Image (cartoon, rainbow, N blue to C red):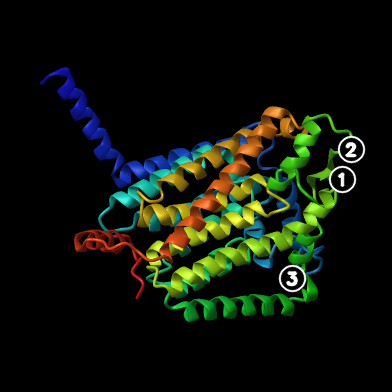
Amino acid sequence: MTDGDEREASAHRIRRFLGTRAALWTGFALVHAALIWLNLAAPGYPLGDVTAVYRLWAENAAHGWLRMGIDAPWVYPILAFAPMAASLAFGSAWYAQTWLAIVTVLNAIAFSVLIGRASLSRPRRIAAWWWLGFLALLGPIAFGRIDAITVPFAITGLLWAAGRPRVAATLLTIGAWIKVWPAALVAALVIAARRRLEVLTVAVSLSVGILGVSLLAGAGTNAMGFIAEQAGRGLQVEAPLAVAWLWQIVAGSKSVRIVYDRQILTFQIDGPGADVAAALTTPLMALGVLVVVLVGVRAARRGAVFGRLLPPLALSLVVVLMLANKVGSPQFATWLAAPVILGLVLRPGRFAVPAFVAASIALFTHIIYPYWYGWLLIADPAFVLLLTGKSLLLVVLLVWGIRSIWRLGSPRSPRSPRSSVREADAVGSTMDLDDH
């Protein structure tokens, strides 16, 4: 055997191994171990919100002093308190480690659903490796905020959306009552699914039940206080809209500065027009969501296939929430994982571009936060440029998503029967994704 043949045989063995469950679970363990270590040891205080804020809220409730969302208005929906309280299971000293363990277990459950128990198809392998790569590129923020709890709910919900719409609606609704963003995935599912009434009924009934329990616990108007708390925020420094003011600081403007809001513990823009921009984000977000919804409804009414419509629709709605957001926190990048994973499972070739763009957004986010976050806070030109690039990549994702949805609702060119069969086989081979 020649050297070339040996190299080819070795490469073939590596490719075969990378396609096995053993390789995927090994990758899962290595990536999660690295991210756990970074959260506990890396500079920049990546686990700061968990140990300094979440733990305090959990301890106050455990001592009967103050229950956030019940005794006082809170920035999060009421179910966000569940993982925060659960992280006290082994005591305050082990709070960070318990939090990271909970995130890892939830991710492992979603990962097992993703790779399935049947034969491991190429789309599932691609999606699984992409998710691990995405987490590695994103860095410790992938675990260090409440959003990390919602992502596995969102991934599992979308993967089960077609075959088990009621279970999917339950998981996504629970996610939305932890952090609001999975509500966008519920909306996408209602539009794309044929069994949309079941999805809507489950989502509404579960929400009413959660709200009712909150009221029985004494929450009163605090049960929906997270809406008012979000509305009262200023324009945070990481928000896409903040880029315009950051460039003014770079240009030497004395009227624009970055300030720290001690009430909500965030860095915000202070300058002419910043408050107006912050106030406009809510109607701008509503308008963006409406546009995507209308384009999605158009595609659904014209017979778009569920497996083709749901991934770009879910992605577009999530990106609208990220772009038209006055907060723009780095952990928002985690939201992209669920729709991209679904797209890679269903149509890996078609979703190659958004997968690459989302991975780039993760990398940009990691560079900015947490290690060198201070450079953004002084509006260093290189880091303002990074934030600008990240915002432009989000625009690229939104344009790609809306264009894809629009094309699904447009007259299609005739395709050969063989092409249609191949597509049907691709969708049918992915877990539980037949829309019955």
Disc 1: CA contacts within 10 A as few (<14), some (14-19) or many (>=20): few
Location of residue 316 by image quarter: bottom right
Disc 2: CA contacts within 10 A as few (<14), some (14-19) or many (>=20): few
Q: Position of residue 109 (x, y in %)?
A: 44, 57
Q: Position of residue 129 (x, y in %)?
A: 39, 44
Q: Residue sitting at 83 percent across and 43 percent down?
A: 260
Observer-side mark, 3 or 2, equals 2
Q: CA distance from mark 1 to mark 2?
A: 7 Å
Circle number at residue 224: 3
Circle number at residue 255: 2
Q: Residue sitting at 85 percent across and 44 percent down?
A: 270
- Identify residue type, mark 1: Pro
Q: Secondary structure at mark 2?
A: loop
65 or 338, which lies in front?
Answer: 338
**Left or right: 205, with 156 as reference point:** right
Q: Which residue is mark 1?
A: 272
- Identify residue type, mark 2: Ser
Circle number at residue 113: none
Q: Residue sitting at 19 percent across and 60 percent down?
A: 418
Q: Residue sitting at 24 percent across and 39 percent down?
A: 16
In the rendered image of this protein, does residue 1 appear above or below residue 214? above
